[in-house]
Amino acid sequence: MIPVKGYAAQNSASLLAPFNFQRREPGPNDVLIDILYCGICHSDLHFVRNDFGKSIYPMVPGHEIAGKVVKVGNKVKRFKASDIVGVGCFVDSCRKCSNCKEGLQQYCQGGLVMTYSSYEKDGKTVTQGGYSTKIVLDENYVLKVSPKLPLEKVGPLLCAGITTYSPLRHWKIGKGHKVGVLGLGGLGHMAVKFASVFGARVTVFSTSPSKEGDAKRLGADDFALSSDLEKMKKLGNYFDFIIDTVSAPHDYNAYLGLLRTNGVMICVGIPPDLAHILPQNIILARRSISGSLIGGLPETQEMLDYCAKHKIMPDVEVIPIQQINHAYDRMVKGDVRYRFVIDLASLK
Ligand code: NAP
Ligand code: ZN
Ligand code: ZN
């Protein structure tokens, strides 16, 4: 077994604290990765707090992993030692269901193995994430990273990036579309970057007046404070799509009315609560509410390559792991510009 240092939550009320654990020796198809950076996603906080009711403790969160291959199993074909790689939100899947076969592993029907707080396919080994020094996984679930991407900016692409890229591609969003982005955090700021590069006219809805300048700098054409009812009224029946990235309970009805006929609200934010929808808000203009989960392996690789080619990168604030609990406090307050990334050198 390989000794690994990490930071873990022991229960839903605990702070994250140092935690030593072990990972398996790489098998024939496995890759051992030295983790260099790991992004902090709001989902990490949801899982630590057991917002979805299925957390497994002790839990080392982290699914925005960038690192270097240090060892490969004897059947590994795609990687060699010293390759720069990424690992996102899942480390295995059934590989047999129709979604896995189509490269939509995120929707695996036979048991997706999430990067942490999940069980490996043996049904008993608990997965542990990227707030740690090393990870071992099957090469098929590892992404190739272009040397053109600064390594500290790679991790956030693997969750915040792909989660916004995937629905934008699915709905073929681009020139001629008016897109609203709800919430300017990790996901929101990537949605703004992608949607504007794809040619859409982007409006950011935010609860934070201080983010207006950033929204425009990131590529938005317009900014609306969600408390500005006059502006909200003016934007009625205006948008083709709204991408909702908000992490906390909020009123979906206030935004459904901003969609034009046939407009689509795409939910990616996961407030751990029921959403109350007034049916007439969708019925009266044949609007739809849709959702989207991260992205499959082929699309994640496509997104990474697209970002390297077009120089699309997240705005990050790099922190030592010892500041993790403070970073969580700031994330809860919406005070992230626009993704925290842990430098794992601080743990070595
Ligand atoms: P984040 O960086 O914390 O950003 C969330 C943003 O939502 C905040 O910056 C804030 O933006 C806004 N917000 C927060 N509380 C709010 C409230 N009470 N009312 C209105 N707006 C509020 O989080 P993230 O990492 O982007 O993740 C966002 C959500 O997506 C989380 O629920 C996460 O679990 C989920 N997620 C889903 C997927 C998926 O596959 N679907 C993948 C990753 C994450 P303003 O300051 O601009 O208002
Ligand atoms: Zn995430
Ligand atoms: Zn499957």
Image: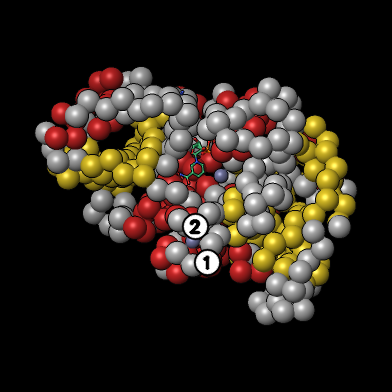
Amino acid carrying label 1: it is: Arg
Residue 2, above or below 98? above
Say which of 110 and 17 sits in front. 110
Judging from the image, what secondary structure is the residue with disc 2 in?
loop
Residue drawn at (57%, 35%) of the image: 54
Left or right: where 224 falls relative to 75:
left
Q: Which mark is residue 258?
A: none
- The residue at which mark 2 appears reads as 110
Q: Which mark is residue 95?
A: 1
Work out whether residue 193 or residue 78 is closer to the camera in this orientation and state it. Answer: 78
Looking at the picture, tell me which residue is in the foreground, 130 or 332: 130
Q: Secondary structure at mark 1?
A: loop
Locate residue 289: give its quadrant.
top left
User: Relative to 192, does residue 51 appear above or below in the rendering?
Assistant: above
State the colouring used for the structure image: secondary structure
Q: Can you say whether 171 is above or below 233 in the image?
A: below
Q: Is mark 1 within 8 Å of ligand 3?
A: yes
Q: Residue at x 83, y 51 (%)?
A: 22
**Residue drawn 74% across the image and 60% down it:** 136
Earlier-in-chain disc, 1 versus 2: 1
Residue 20 quadrant: top right
The residue positioned farthest toward the left in the image shown = 284
Q: Is residue 220 left or right of residue 230?
A: right
Quarter of the picture holding the N terminus: bottom right
Q: Residues within 10 Å of mark 2 (few under 14, many from 20)?
A: some
Marks 1/2 in contact by CB < 8 Å: the verdict is yes
For the point 55% across and 31% down, the residue is 53
Indicate which quadrant contains ligand 2.
Answer: top right
